[in-house]
Amino acid sequence: MSCKKKALVALIGSIFMAGASTALAGPSAKAMADTCAGCHGTDGQSVGPASPNLAGMSAVYFIDSMTAFKNLEKGAWSGEDARPATIMNRIAKGYTDEQIEAMAEYFAAMPVYKADVPHDAAKAKKGAAVYDKACSKCHDENGALADDDSGILAGQWLPWMQYSMQDFISGNREMPKKMKKEVKKLSDEEIEASLHFFASQK
Amino acid sequence: MANFTRRKFLQATGGAVAVSSIGFPAIVGAASKKVVIVGGGVAGATAAKYIRMADSSIDVTLIEPNTEYYTCFMSNEVLSGHRKLDSIRVTYDGLKGHGVTVVHDTVTDIDAAGKKVMTAGGKTMAYDRCIVAPGISFKDNIEGYDAAAMEAMPHAWKAGNQTVLLRKQLEAMPDGGVVAIAAPPNPFRCPPGPYERACQISMYLQAKKPKSKLIIFDSKNKFSKFGLFKQAFERHHKGTIEWVSADNGGKVTRVDGGSNTLYVGDTAHKVDVANVIPAQQAGAIAIKAGLTDDSGWCPIDGRSFESTLQKGVHVIGDASIAKPLPKSGYAANSEGKTCAAAVVAMLGGKAAGDPSLVNTCYSVVGPDDAISVAMVYDLKDGKLSKVAGSGGLTPTDSSPEARAREVQYAYSWFENIKADSWG
């Protein structure tokens, strides 16, 4: 485990300690998390074709994502510390930071779910090499490691990953520095292949 | 196996109700709690599944006349030919997998004082808590819209055979024909539905019968996602869709199924295909069981969805008055979960927790163009309320890329809500 990851794990710990010491008023984490299922699947296991699985997502990544959605003004497609969204910015604004943390903890406690995603096997094979050279340092275990701040990519729905990469490349979603460095070296075909590789993970 | 044993036991005793839990070899000393759910649409199915997921010791029986269900959502894409009827069909196998006992029968009455339901099949079933999710029934606001007219001018507002009827009529219609949609007054199931339907049928007409027209005769002067639909009519359906508001002669008061004629007052509109959607109220069993108020809908407590008129009976889905939640599929799913959590708590002798609900509703209005409305709800001062700052509509100026993504998210929503409710 890298130092960064250790720090993040500590951070998650501190968030949950704080959560535990001040009992949340209002709806339970389950009551809130269950409302996600209509689009993200029962217990965060999406049956596709474009909304991501939430089961097993790291708490930090979940909080980052919901915060970025909350920061996106209605009607906007990009913004300060924000992420492009069609509907998630409208949904995320319905929850306090504490409620988002409670949902994050709820989904993080679930095992990672890898969906059976239709993909191109030849591209996935090519993508394995791309993964090794460009993605593996942060997206450990073929993108299935949850205990860091990078999203789970293994068994994620392809259209969602493609949208995410479009947003990273267009600059509408900020790329982490390390990712920017790696993505710059890759061709469009290599990027696409890497997504098929993640989609192929069982 | 407990359910199998129980079912066999009930059969052996002719469905006697006093046996409650003694048929359960697995549970010794504690009577298992029994929930009867009336209706296997989105709300009823979701409640059944989520009760069993939360507490598998609760005995859940779902009573539904049909052995398969056709979702209203995405049925407009069946009308346009974009998808097959099969894709909107769900079965009850998934619920059985969760240990729900599914009985195909029709509930004829509910005895809230005696805590039992009676069925057309002659069964009497006792319950500790009953959940009623009967959907909608039609009011007689349109003169002449009888059983025969309903075949000639399908409402297609309960999906399945009616959807097929309307689709066949559209297919048989000559190029240059006129399709009419008579849109109902508020409140009704799926507020954006008639207008998404117009867009979907228009896409079919433009592709296959480009000289044809579609007229929406409306009982209202405004409707859900109004600005976005007006934009879509202009952007994708100019020259095909015409919307006639109530004030401009849109309110259909009478029909003649024999001649496919709609009457607005004394003015007759003879058309080739007529989709007549009447005014609505709660499903018939809710009215019979005394769960409705003067409005024809069922008042409920927002925390538990327990009826304010009949103790121990909860009402969810389109039949309930859950304002500000709309009568939508997503709301029904969310209400099913809220009610399930409340029922599990109450059967365990605890108070129901604070609810959290969401509505998300997509309309596919053109090629690569979908629009949506969303909202988060909670309980404030005992009343269901919108969470301030949340929700709202797709922006009218959103980019083609965003609109195309909304189509894909609509399809994701569809697959997930089917699986989440019945799977």
Image (cartoon, rainbow, N blue to C red):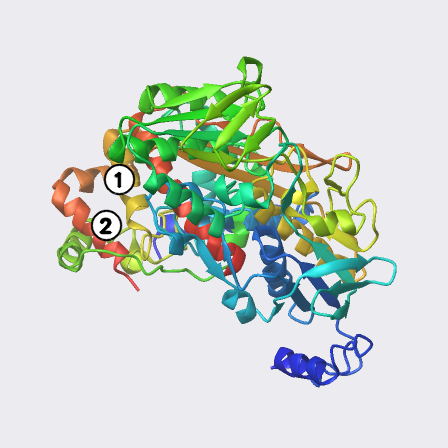
Residue B86 in picture, x, y percent from top left: 39, 56
Residue occupying the point 25% across, 34% down: B207
Q: Residues within 10 Å of mark 2 (few under 14, many from 20)?
A: many
Residue type highlighted by circle 2: Leu
- Taking depth in this image into account, of B131 and A47 the one nearest to the observer is B131
Residue B24 image position (x, y, % from top left):
71, 82
Mark 1: amino acid: Met
Report whether B292 appears left or right of A191: right
Looking at the rendered structure, which numbered label has been put on residue A165?
Answer: 1
The residue most toward the top is: B248
Placement of B141 over or under A123, stated as above or below: above
Image point (56%, 31%), residue name:
B255
Identify whether A170 is placed above or below A38. Answer: above
Residue displayed at 74% across by 80% down: B14
In the picture of the structure, the residue carrying the numbered disc 2 is: A195
Instruction: Work out how far the residue at label 2 is from the one at label 1, CA to CA, in angstroms.
Output: 9 Å
Q: Earlier in the sequence, mark 2 or mark 1?
A: 1
For the residue pair B109 and A8, the one nearer the viewer reads as B109
- Residue at the spot x=67%, y=36% of the render? B140
Q: Is residue B333 above or below residue A89?
A: below
Q: Is residue B209 left or right of residue A114?
A: left
Q: Position of residue B236 (x, y in %)?
A: 32, 24
Tell me if I can see residue B342 in this picture: yes
Whether residue B80 is visible: no
Disc 2 to disc 1: CB gap under 8 Å:
yes
Percent across and percent down for residue A139 are 29, 52
Chain that bears disc 2 = A
